[in-house]
Amino acid sequence: MSESGKILLVTGGSRGIGAATCRLAAKAGYRIAVNYASNVRAAETVVAAIEAGGGEAVAVRGDIGSETDVLAMFEAVDARFGGLDALVNNAGVVDSLSRVDEMSFARLERMMRINVIGPMLCAREAVKRMSTRHGGKGGAVVNLSSIAARLGGAGQYVDYAASKNAINTFSVGLAREVAGEGIRVNIVSPGIIDTEIHASGGQPDRAEKMGRVVPMQRAGTAEEVAAAILWLLSDKASYTTGAILEVGGGR
């Protein structure tokens, strides 16, 4: 699969699924904008690995929970690459385990601002650049959801699950809205994946523990999710839009 020369922006590209997506996309020929919120060293490590393999990449700072940062991020991609062909909305957050009746407004506001509003803003800016309605040449968007959206996250993080279900609904609606403008929009919905995000929610061993209850009896890898993302971005998925592709080991 070759996507030689295409420009891809991956939000949250400095670690986990985002970093795996950047590395795999670079091997497919994409030029990569590796977005990060604060850990520039991690983003530069991904960029260095891509460049060592003969690819082209740049680290681009931006908190997707800030419209100012989102606009600056897209402007930086424009300045470096002169356009955009694909977007992977991967950046997101979890929080500590909590019941709904224990959740603060600050927690809920942060969750929705980063996990819902941020990806919507990024999609908005991508459409402005890719849509034939705006003079673009089309493109592809993949939004990262979660199987938690289907399961609900009871007793753990209902807010996170709700944010991901919002992404599912938004993605299906956007897919239908821009299907005639050369843009495909799809969703990848991972299950239990062994990445750093579990530690950020206070459960560094969650993937190992939860992997035992998955029908395939293991956690997935970031690379397995990245492979699904790359297929949806590629021309091999040219008649696929508005789809939710679960990568969850049968959970």
Image (spheres, rainbow, N blue to C red):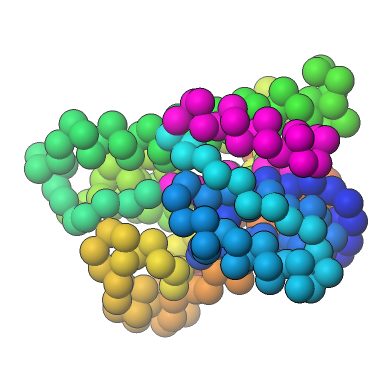
Return the residue nearer the eye: 10 or 43. Answer: 43
Look at 23% across and 39% down and name the residue there: 107
Look at 14% across and 48% down and name the residue there: 99
Look at 68% across and 23% down and name the residue there: 177
Q: What stretch is highlighted in magenta?
A: 66-92
Seen in the picture, residue 129 relative to 154 is either above or below; the reply is: above
Residue 78 picture location, percent across and down: 75, 34
Return the residue nearer the eye: 135 or 74. Answer: 74
Please, which residue is most extreme toward the top here?
133
Query: Seen in the image, is 186 located left or right of residue 169?
Result: right
> Is 69 covered by the magenta stretch?
yes
Seen in the picture, residue 148 relative to 134 is either above or below; the reply is: below
Residue 88 picture location, percent across and down: 63, 47
Seen in the picture, residue 192 relative to 111 is either above or below; the reply is: below
Query: Seen in the image, is 227 located left or right of residue 181?
Result: left
Q: Quadrant of residue 44?
A: bottom right
